[in-house]
Image: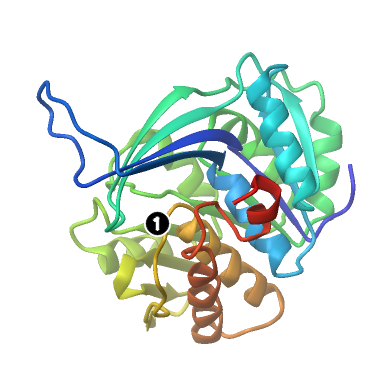
Amino acid sequence: MPAASVFITGPASWNSIVVLDRLPEPVPHMQFAEDSWDTVGGTSAGKALSLTGLGRSVLLYALAADDEHAVRVQAALADAGVPTHWGPAEATERHVNLMTRQGGRVSLYLASPSATDGAEDEELRAAMADADAIVLDLAAEPLRLLPLARETGRPIWVDVHDYDGEAEFHRPFLEAADAVFCNADRLEDPVAFLQSTIAAGATLAVCTLGAEGAVAVDAGGAVHRVGAVPVEVVDTNGAGDAFLAGVLDASLAGASVPDALAAGARSASSVLGTRHLHPLLDQVMGS
């Protein structure tokens, strides 16, 4: 496996995006889509694309089956210049994302790979140990790799997305994390949650707030805020991943927390004007 500054493991998927005027109510009914398209998805693919776009060397470790969906995802990421190591899976991850123009989303998981048997663990351990930082996203294989990642002593960054403060699946990730990212969708008090993660041992905790930017708490307990960069929004998929990528890239370059947050906001704005996870995919996907 090639050496990289950032080792990322987690979902890379084939997604169908469906734009609606409103998210569906939980009752039988019919709606007409305003737009739809297929594209690369997955939170780890999004982070890897954004870091690649920023010039940071990455290695994305993701799982895929021997099927047509894998062929599309693998070809797109390769053409976009993202170094990727593919592990075996019984199914390639696939989603249908129901979206609104305002950024509302319901993600329907059609397939999600199980964890592997660990046949490549020595190679994966070496790749993680060579990295400046490890990003572990929420999925079965990254959960399995958590002990190996901790053994390397490298900084671990996690993204718990719309965590509600209680879900058990997220807890091992939070316990291992040096840096924690989330969004405010299901948190009553984002700052209090960020402060609790710092108290538990993290050195940076960040919550994205959509159009309001983001808020962070650093290792010393100081609260920092950054505004969103104004931009015409085409699609919000990948914005949170791009934000984390911008903060991580700047942090590895020695930036202060405020400067890293500003870099995250700029990175997030760069993906909001495309229908894909990152502009690197525009030519690859043909739109």
Question: Residue lying farthest top?
Answer: 90
Number of other residues with Cα within 10 Å of mark 1, as a class: few under 14, some 14 to 19, many 20 or more: many
Image point 74% across, 23% down: which residue? 118
Image point 54% across, 51% down: which residue? 276
Question: Residue lying farthest left?
Answer: 27
Q: From the viewer's perspective, is residue 255 above or below residue 86?
A: below
Question: In this orientation, which residue lies closer to the viewer: 276 or 62?
Answer: 276
The quarter of the picture where residue 267 lies is bottom right
Question: Residue lying farthest right?
Answer: 2
Give percent across and percent down for residue 221: 39, 78
The reply to whether residue 150 is in sight is no
* The N terminus: image quadrant: top right
Image point 33% across, 47% down: which residue? 163
| Display colour scheme | rainbow
Image point 48% across, 52% down: which residue? 159
Question: In this orientation, which residue lies closer to the viewer: 98 or 47?
Answer: 98
Give percent across and percent down for residue 116: 68, 20
| Secondary structure state at the residue bearing disc 1 | strand
Query: Label 1 is placed on what type of residue?
Result: Cys
Residue corresponding to mark 1:
182
Question: In this orientation, which residue lies closer to the viewer: 127 or 233?
Answer: 233
Give percent across and percent down for residue 90: 63, 13
Give percent across and percent down for residue 206: 42, 67
Answer with left or right where residue 208 lies relative to residue 248: left
Q: From the viewer's perspective, is residue 261 above or below residue 35?
A: below
The reply to whether residue 76 is in sight is yes
Answer with left or right where residue 156 lies relative to residue 217: right
Q: From the viewer's perspective, is residue 199 above or below residue 222?
A: above
